[in-house]
Amino acid sequence: MVEAKKAGTRNVITRQLFYPFRQWSRHTKKKVVPLFFEERAGTFTLWEFRFRDPEDYNSVEFVRAAKYRIENKD
């Protein structure tokens, strides 16, 4: 499950991750991983989160982040 923004994000609102996470978790037996994705000036950043308690909005935890840049090698 991915929440994506074009640019300029100052913070992540937990609601943007929690409600889609909870919905997808109820409709599949697969593990649902909440990701937040942002593109800013050609750099793509992914943040991974988890919910300690899938029913508790406030149980969100940051797991890890990574940045990627795609370059054209002409």
Image: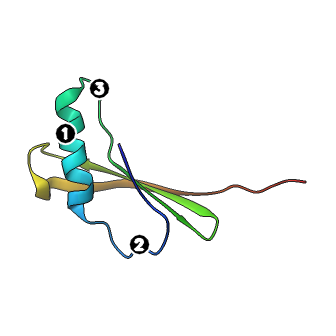
Please identify, in this view, whether the residue under mark 3 or under mark 2 is nearer the observer.
2
Identify the residue at the far right of this view: 74
- Determine the residue positioned at 24% across, 23% down: 29
Q: Which quadrant is home to the N terminus?
A: top left
Q: Is residue 40 above or below residue 53?
A: below
Relative placement, left or right, of 53 versus 8 is left
Q: Position of residue 32 (x, y in %)?
A: 30, 36
Q: Quadrant of the C terminus?
A: bottom right
Residue most extreme to the top: 29
Q: Which of pointers 3 and 2 lies earlier in the amino acid sequence?
A: 2
Amino acid at pointer 1: Gln
- Look at mark 1 in the image and give the residue it sits on: 23
Tell me the element at label 2: loop
Residues at circles 2 and 1 in contact by the CB criterion of under 8 Å: no
Q: Which residue is mark 3?
A: 30
**Amino acid type at mark 3:** Lys
Tag 3: Cα neighbours inside 10 Å, few (<14), some, or many (≥20)?
few
- Report whether 47 appears left or right of 12: right
Confirm or deny contact between disc 3 and disc 2 (CB under 8 A).
no
- Distance from disc 2 to disc 1, alpha carbons, whole Å, reads 24 Å
Residue type at mark 2 is Thr
